[in-house]
Image (cartoon, helix red, strand yellow):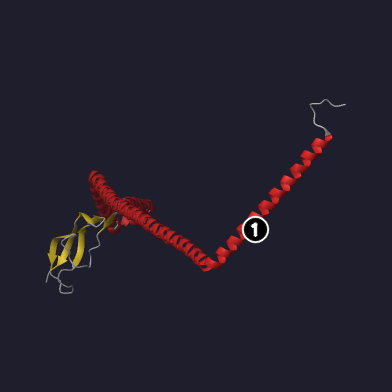
Amino acid sequence: MLPEEYPSNSRLQSFSSNMDTNDANTDKHNIDALNKLRDQFNDFLQQNGETVLATLEQQDASQTQVTLYNLFSELAALKTEVKRESKQVKDAVGQFSGLLDTLTKNNQQLSIELERQKQQDEKTAFAYRLPLLEDMLDLSDSLQHTLENAKKYKPSWWERRSKRAQFFRQDMIDGLEITQRRINKALRQHDVNAINCIGKKFDPHTMKAVKLVNSKKHENGIVLAEIRKGYTRHGEVIRLAEAVVNKT
């Protein structure tokens, strides 16, 4: 048997029945309120539907305008940025072109200076070698005269009959010719070239008239003979040619 402080079963059943009744009443009241609110909203739409639609369309258009405005603003900003960067690139290219032109001019000036210095060094070195070259030219002249005289020499009757004398004379001529070729080769290695003047018009820049003759067979001013050879190097005269010139 339960204690008296606990309610009896009949009381519990009565309490539960009251709770169910209250819940049912509450749900019915809520449903009625919702139906009433729906009816009021439908009435509002029927009375003000066109106004609501116009308001919504204005809001959509406003949003569209705002979006296009933002798009054009961004495009304008992008265009400005592109122009600014293009100007920066153009300025950089201009500076690079100026620097390149400066380097090119400096390189050309340096090349000219180096070439001038090279020519100056060659002239200085040649000036030191000039006395030796002049001695070589004198030696070449002496050998040439000796060779010509040896070829023109007329042996005596005894020398013509002596094979030994003939061999000696021919060996001497061969030795002179070999020496002459070596000297000419050494002169060519130093870019020293002989002046060809026989049969040409007299040139006071490369020739020196040491004798004048009157020959009607030749034109006036023609070089008839060469007394001493002249030489040039890179177009500059080292020694004037001594010539016999015709003067009519």
- Residue nearer the viewer, 45 or 36: 36
Name which residue lies at 41% across and 59% down. 73
Q: Work out which quarter of the rendered image holds the C terminus and state it.
A: bottom left
Q: Is residue 172 left or right of residue 45?
A: left
Disc 1 element? helix
User: Is residue 37 shown above or below 139?
Assistant: below
Q: Is residue 2 left or right of residue 125?
A: right
- Residue nearer the viewer, 56 or 209: 56
Residue 221 occupies quadrant = bottom left
Position of residue 56 measured from the top left corner of the image (x, y, whole percent): 51, 63
Q: Is residue 107 left or right of residue 236?
A: right
Specify the amino acid type for callout 1. Answer: Asn
Position of residue 143 measured from the top left corner of the image (x, y, whole percent): 28, 51
Furthest toward the right, the residue is 1
Q: Is residue 216 left or right of residue 47?
A: left
Q: Is residue 11 visible?
A: yes
